[in-house]
Amino acid sequence: MDRRLFLSRLGAGAGVALAVTCLGSCMGGAEPDPSGVPVDFTLDLNQSPNLQSKGGFMVISNVLVARTVQGEYVAATVICSHEQQKKVVYDKAGNNFHCTAHDARFDVNGGGLNAKGSKNLTVYHTALSGSTLRVFSTSL
Ligand code: FES
């Protein structure tokens, strides 16, 4: 194969690979990520005691993962949209995310519940498979 033919075929292959990658990851509503880093990790719930009871939560690399009082798994950034302090926790009494810096509150879908929370909060998807919980952003 001559060099020109090889490069031509390589270019076509790269285009197809790019299209497949984009179809898999570019569809749907991408969520803004305050850190700019896509989120995608799994947790073994058998090794995560804080998530074994309703109302518990834990933080992994700026991502808050909580088990709501209804038993659902939710995830959000710990970086508050108000002044970017890393003080967001899950408040089981109110079933919402709460920034302890200035009292911003967000529902479990990231919607702001008061003036300090008016910029909403980045939340992530969760998917449970057996005892494995995947936490991921749509921007992957
Ligand atoms: S930084 Fe969170 S409420 Fe101000």
Image (spheres, helix red, strand yellow):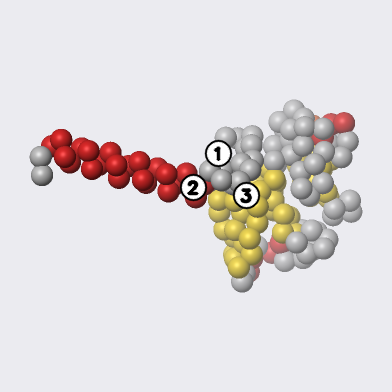
**In this rendering, the label closer to the viewer, 2 or 3:** 2
Instruction: Tell me what residue is drawn at x 23 percent, y 43 percent.
Output: 9
Query: In the rendered image, which residue does mark 2 sit on?
Result: 23
Looking at the rendered structure, the kind of residue marked 1 is Val
| Element marked by disc 1 | loop
Q: Is residue 76 above or below residue 49?
A: above
- Residue ID for mark 3: 60
Compute the Cα span from label 1 to label 2: 20 Å
Cα–Cα span, label 1 and label 3:
14 Å
Q: Is there any visible trace of residue 126 in the rendered image?
A: yes
Amino acid type at mark 2: Leu
- The spot of residue 76 in percent (x, y) is 70, 46
Question: Are the residues tagged 1 and 2 within 8 Å (C-beta)?
Answer: no
Mark 2 or 3, nearer chain start: 2
Between discs 1 and 3, the one toward the N terminus: 1
As measured in the structure, the alpha-carbon distance from the residue carrying label 2 to the one carrying label 3 is 29 Å
Is 81 situated above or below 49? Answer: above
